[in-house]
Image (cartoon, rainbow, N blue to C red):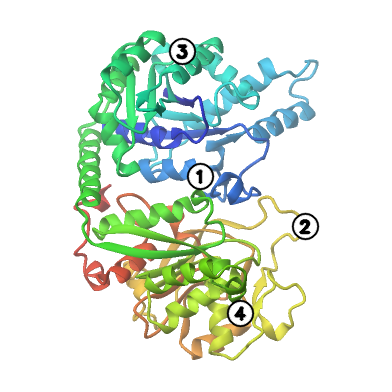
Amino acid sequence: MKYVVVSGGVISGIGKGVLASSTGMLLKTLGLKVTSIKIDPYMNIDAGTMSPLEHGECFVLNDGGETDLDLGNYERYLNVTLTKDHNITTGKIYSHVIARERKGDYLGKTVQIVPHLTNAIQDWIERVAKIPVDDTGLEPDVCIIELGGTVGDIESAPFVEALRQFQFRVGRENFALIHVSLVPVIHGEQKTKPTQAAIKDLRSLGLIPDMIACRCSEIMEKATIEKIAMFCHVGAEQVVNVHDVNSTYHVPLLLLEQKMIDYLHSRLHLHDITLTPDDVSKGENLLSKWKATTGNFDASMETVKIALVGKYTHLKDSYLSVIKALEHSSMQCRRILEIQWVEASDLEPEMQELDKEKFHEAWEKVSTADGILVPGGFGTRGTEGMMLAARWARENKIPYLGICLGLQIATIEFARDVLNKKEGNSTEFINDLQDSDQVVVYMPEIDKENMGGTMRLGLRPTYFQEDTEWSIIKKLYGNHDSVEERHRHRYEINPEFVEELEAHGLVFVGKDDTNKRCEILELKNHPYYVATQYHPEYTSKVLDPSKPFLGLVAASSGILQDVLDGKYQIHGQHEF
């Protein structure tokens, strides 16, 4: 097993996740099997209980693991299926060591950070790195490890020490370190001092970088690269210039241009790994398809405007997988994606009194959009604004996609306006709601006391109902009888309302295996009005976009029938 560690210095949010994913993707183009592990130094067991405004989106895996958003990057770039164990947190590793201490595994020993905690971290990495993550079912050849946070932070110290020891455990030829640093441009001058200081800190902790990836707003000058190489004790070929590009999908090609893979091939003795001709061919196909897809991005001329009506719009990372799924779909449809960010509460009548400018600006975005998307969320804030957006889409025949909360919102709005249930609502928003007004209810099997890991989580099947041959979403899924998608919710559509809703045209074309829980709704006689209880964005891939998102972008672009007819396929995409 070869290990490539990606760490970061100077500032957080510098782009370690994209660089780690891009490095892994390039290694896959050689025909290698690649896996990824993300280390997060926070004390939480997982990301499930953190606010999206605090830490960005919570990404859900097949096994129900609620993890850091970077695992979404890995799955999208590498086309792999990870597990909750691929995300290590301080909370998880401490809980693991304390549980072993209580069990008596360390009997007679004083349990310490070194060696017990650091050994546990190394054992965890070695165990998880061997888990098969792709359709071959074979053990991976290379594991990319991203160390979250910034090197030098007190909270990441045990992980840094564990990695320092780990390089000796696995051997120099099996361990490489890429350090991502910042080269700011001040008054037109590229400054290298922050990178010099970051590398000095890294070396003082016993980790020596093999490559330095420099994030810069512009292409770095040769003199800057040489200066970094000289003061950081590396060769100029080990300094990679990761400057700003049109999209993050160009980053792998940027790294390829700078011969990063040539260096890693030599440094990690990748020639020692035996590859079949089929492996090599798959790698070459991946690279050509990736270039074709990013070429679509660059060649796109027409714009498609999607209004994203959410409640965490102040931090775009709260909807990272949604954004990526829209990007994947727009690339396949060969359109330039323009997301109109709309804070849902700005659409509500009260905002007209509080801030007229915000109110009119929000409605202008919604009313001029080609399509409307209402993503997931929790709590009552902004829900009335979401319902107004859903109603606008329904009445004006504007393509609409609702996800999780977006499905519940669309159903409540329909019940209020079409079924005349004016007080219809969700028990999430109003605790003492009368039974006759409970359009959305708490799922009976869900724990009401504990918050962490208690939702309906992970990959679950959805079965298309009889007499749904007309359904657009079913056609997008290839007319299969069922689909498997990832879930994350506590509330569901009240089954008692389903018959009446369907009689008026809001049809639940997909349900769970009990045939009672509503999974997909679709409005008849509408260009595209679809909502899902599950989160299709979690399984969207660069070369295989999520079908509900593809439908939204295609319908918003006026090319839905062409997409259904297969006229916008990426050549050979399903071979990937």
Residue 447: which quarter of the image?
bottom right
Question: Residue 303's spot in the image, x, y percent?
Answer: 27, 62
Please state the horizontal and vertical placement of residue 489, each as a whole percent of the image.
Answer: 60, 62
The residue closer to the viewer here, 16 or 568, is 16
Q: Which mark is residue 273?
A: none
Under tag 2, what secondary structure?
loop
Q: Earlier in the sequence, mark 1 or mark 3?
A: 1
Which residue is denoted by mark 4 in the rendering?
495
Q: Which mark is residue 449?
A: 2
Which residue is more in the foreground, 167 or 374? 374
Q: Give the spatial CA distance, label 4 vs label 1.
A: 33 Å
Residue 69 is tagged as 1
Of residue 566 and residue 243, the one placed in the foreground of this image is 243
User: Which amino acid does the dot numbered 1 rest on?
Assistant: Leu
Q: Is residue 366 visible?
A: yes
Q: Which is more foreground, mark 4 or mark 1?
A: 1
Can you identify the residue that label 3 sits on?
Answer: 208
Q: Amino acid at mark 3?
A: Ile
Packing grade of label 3 (10 A; few <14, some 14-19, many >=20) is some
Mark 2 or mark 4: which comes first in sequence? 2
Give the Cα distance between marks 2 and 1.
Answer: 26 Å
Q: Secondary structure at mark 1?
A: loop
Q: Residue at x 63, y 87 (%)?
A: 422
Crowd rating for badge 2 (residues with CA inside 10 Å; few <14, some 14–19, many 20+): few
First in sequence, mark 4 or 1: give its number.
Answer: 1
Rendered image quadrant of residue 263: top left
What's the CA distance linking mark 1 and mark 3?
Answer: 27 Å
Q: Are marks 3 and 4 in contact (CB under 8 Å)?
A: no
Mark 4 secondary-structure assignment: helix
Q: Amino acid at mark 4?
A: Pro
Q: Which numbered mark, 2 or 3, is in the foreground of this view?
A: 3
